[in-house]
Image (cartoon, coloured by chain):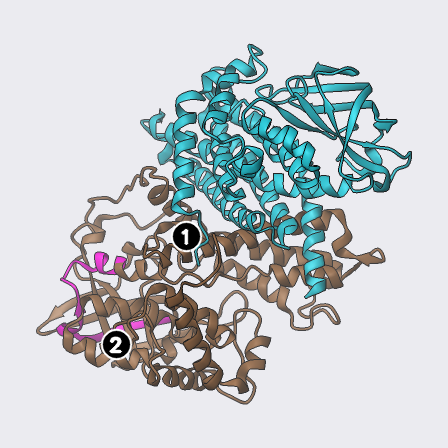
Amino acid sequence: MNFDDTPTEAAFRAEARAWIAANAPREHEADLRASPFGRVALRNTDIIAASKTWQKKKADAGWACLHWPKEYGGRGASPIERVIWGQEEGVFGKLSGLFIIGHGMCGPTVMAFASEEHKHKRLPPLASGEEIWCQLFSEPAGGSDLAGLRTRAEKSGGEWVINGQKIWTSGAHHSDWGLLIARTDPEVAKHKGLTMFFLDMKSPGVEIRPIKQANGQAEFNEVYFTDVRIPDHQRLGKVGDGWNVSLTTLMNERLSIGASMPTGFPELFDLCERLDADGRPAIENRHVRAKLANWATKSNGLKFTGYRAMSALSRGERPGPENSIGKLVAGSTMQDIAQFALELEGPMGALRRTPGIDETGLFVAMLLRSPATRIEGGTDEILRNIIAERVLGLPADIRLDKDVPFDKIPTKGR
Amino acid sequence: MNFDFSDEQKQLRDEARRFLSENCTPKEVRAVLEGKAKYDAKIWKGLADLGLLGIAIPEEFGGAGAGRLELCVVAEELGRALAPVPYSSTVYLASELLMLAGSDAQKKHWLPKIAAGEAIGTLALVEAVGDATPKSIQATVSGGKLTGRKTLVPEGEIADFAIVVAREKAGDDARGVGLYIVDMKGAGVSAKSVETVDPSRNHAEVAFSGAPADPLGQVGEGWSCVDKVLDRAAVLVAFEQIGGADRALEMGRDYALDRMAFGRPIGSFQAVKHMLADMYVAATLARSNAYYGAWALSTDAGELAEAAANARVSATQAYQLCAKNNTQVHGGMGFTWEFDCHLYYRRSNLLALSLGSLTMWENRLIDEMRKRNAAA
C-alpha cells in the first residue's frame, strides 16, 4: 500500500510537469485560484478565448485529450496517465470546463459510431478546442426518464427533419456542434424509437435561449429546433438504436474520475477557525466539532475512494457504476455545509457577502448552486438506483411504460 | 499509486475468511452470547495455529514478524464473522503496548505466549462514566502493589494478564500515570462478570486489592502510551467495523432479494433500495478511510493520529448505520432472537464505545486537523 507512482507513471509525471511549468498561462493563475466555486472569471481576458488558447497550445504539443488515439488528436495515453495529467495541470484545469462535454462525452460517441471520414474531420478540432461541442439530451419531459424525450426526427429524402425542444444544454451558445438524440418512431416502445445524430449548431432553425437559473446565473440553455435538417450521414448508429448509443455517451462520463468534486469542507473548516463564537473560535464549540468531524470523514472518504479508483485504473481495471458515489455524497454534503456556514454567522449569514467573514460570498453561492449539483448528470435518486441495481444487484424498478408504444404512454399526472 | 492491499495480503484475508466461515458461524457466536462459554477457545486455538495471533509480533518474540497491514486484513474478517474471541484486547491493545513500552524481559515473557495462544491479555482503563481521562484514573500503585477498581475490563474474566492504567502519585493529571502488568489469575485480583450490550464478548468489573504490579515503561509516560496505542487500535477496530458493516449490508441485500411483499421482492421498492444504497455509500467511504488509516499505521506516519480518528469516526458511523438498517430491511423478523440481525446490531454498538465514544474521536480528529493546518 503506497501512494507512489510506478516508474512509468513517474516518468510521465515528470514530463507533464516540465511541459506545464514551461507553458502554462501563468498570467491567469491568480484569477483561476481566486475562482473558488462554480464560475471561473478572469480579469481583462475573455474566459472562452483564454480556454481555447490553452487548449490549442496543449494540442499542438500532444497534451490534449490524452486518452484519445493520436490519429484523432489525442496522445494514446493510459487512463492513469490522464489522471496524473489532471493532478499536474492543477488550477489550469479550470480552463478546460468549456470542453468537458465535448471531450468526455460527445467525442467518444463520435469515435465509436461515426464514419472514418467524420472522425478525421471532427475529432482533431474538438481535441484542440477549435470546435466546441454540446450534448442535446435532456428535455422538459425527459430528464431522469431520458428515454421519454419527445423531439422528433423525420426522414425526408437523404435528410432528417428535426422539430422539438432540448433543455439544460450547457454551453450551447458557444458550441459549433451538437450531439442530438431524437425520436424517429413514436409508435414503438420508448427505448426502441430513438436515434442519435450530430449537427452543426449554426444550422437554420436552431434557436438557443439562455435559462435564468434559480440562483440567478445562466450556465445552461434551451435549444429549440424548427425544421432543422441533418444529413443522414451524420446519424450515429442505426435508426432506432439511439438508446444504446446514448449509453456509450453516459458510460464515458464515468471515466472522468480522479478529480474529486468540491464539498466546501476546507473552506468551512477555515471559517470555523476564523469565526468567533462567545469569545472563542467556533471550532472549539462541541456542537461545531461534531458536525465538522462528520463532514471531514465524508470529504476524506471521497478523496480516498478516488485513490482506490485510481489504483484500480493503474492496474488496468475499468471504472464501473460504483463511481456514482462521488457526486451523490459531494452534492448533499455541499448543501449541508453551506447552510451550516451561514447558520454560524447568525442573522448576518443572510448577507450575500459577509464583511470580514466571507468577502467573496462563497457560502451563499454554494447554497444557491448546490440544489443543481444534486440534480444534474443524474439526480441523487437515480444515483441511488444505479448503486442499488448495478452494484448491489437489486431488481430494476417496475416500469409501467415497458413495451407500451411511446404514443400511448400517459403524459398527464392528474 | 497502489492504494490497496497486496496480493499476499489478500491471500491472507482469504485464508482467514475460509477458517472463520468454517469455524465461526453464528452458532459459535451465540454460544458465547447465551453464556455457554466466555469465549470460543477452539477458534482462539485455531487462530494461534494459523499464526494469526502473532502476525505483527517480531520473529525473535515468537511472532510472524509481518506488518500491521496483515493485521488489518485479519481484523476485517474477525469483524465480519463477529468472532467471539479476545483478539482486540490481546492483539491490538496488550500486545501493542508491550511492543511499544515493554522491556526486553517483559517482551520475552509475554509476546511468545500471546503468539502461541497461551496468554490472553487486556487493557484495564475505564473507572468511571464518560471517556477516560488522566483525571479519571484513580487506581493507585504503591510499593509495587495495585489497589483500585476498573469498572469495565474487556475480557476481564478470561484474561491471563492485564495492562492496568494506574497512578503512583495522587493527582488528576497525566504526570503520575503509569502502566502496570498484573497477573489476572494471581493474588489480589477479583473479576466479576458484567452484562453489556453485546454479551458475545466477555466483560468484567475488576477489583484490585494489593495485586502485584510490574511497571511497564516509565511512570508519567503511561498516558501517552495509551494514547498512541488507542490510535493504532482505532485503525484495527475500524477494520473490524467495516467487515461487520459489509456483512450487515449483504444480509440486508440478500433478504431484500428473497422476501416478497405486495407481489414483488421488497428489494424492488425504492424506499428499500435507497436505504441499501445509503448503507453501501457509508460502508465504502468508511473502507476508504480505513485504508488510509492502514497506510498511516503500517508506515508509522506522522498523520497516524488524524488518520486513525478519521477511520474510527467513519467506521463507527457506517457500522451503526448498516447494522440498524439491516434490521429495518428484515422487518419484524429482524427483531427476533432467531435472526442474526441483532448480533450485528449489538456488536456495532459495542465497538462504537469500546475505544472511547464517538464524541471523543471526533474531538481527536478536529484537534489533529487543526494541528496540521497550523503547521502548514
Residue A70's tag is 2
Identify the chain drawn in cyan.
B
Residue B145 is drawn in which quadrant? top right
Residue A89 spot, x, y in % from top left: 46, 74
Residue B111 is drawn in which quadrant? top right
Q: Is residue B182 magenta?
A: no
Q: Decide if residue A191 is on the left or right side of residue A52.
A: left
The residue under label 2 is which amino acid type?
Lys
Question: Outermost residue toward the bottom?
Answer: A44
Q: Decide if residue B27 is on the left or right side of residue B376.
A: left
Q: Nearer the viewer, residue B117 or B83?
A: B117
**Region in magenta:** A221-247
Q: Decide if residue A389 is on the left or right side of residue A194.
A: right
The residue under label 1 is which amino acid type?
Ser
Q: What residue lies at 70% left-to-right and 67% top-to-bottom?
A: A351
Q: Which residue is mark 1?
A: A324
Q: What residue lies at 49% left-to-right and 24% top-to-bottom?
A: B341
Element carrying mark 1: helix
Q: Nearer the viewer, residue A264 or B148?
A: B148
Q: What residue lies at 64% left-to-right and 18% top-to-bottom?
A: B158
Q: Nearer the viewer, residue B63 or B131?
A: B63
Residue B50 is drawn in which quadrant? top left
* Mark toward the start of the polypeptide (1 vs 2): 2
Residue B261 spot, x, y in % from top left: 36, 25
Shade of chain A as shown in the rendered figure = brown
Badge 2 density bin: few <14, some 14–19, many ≥20, Cα 10 Å? some
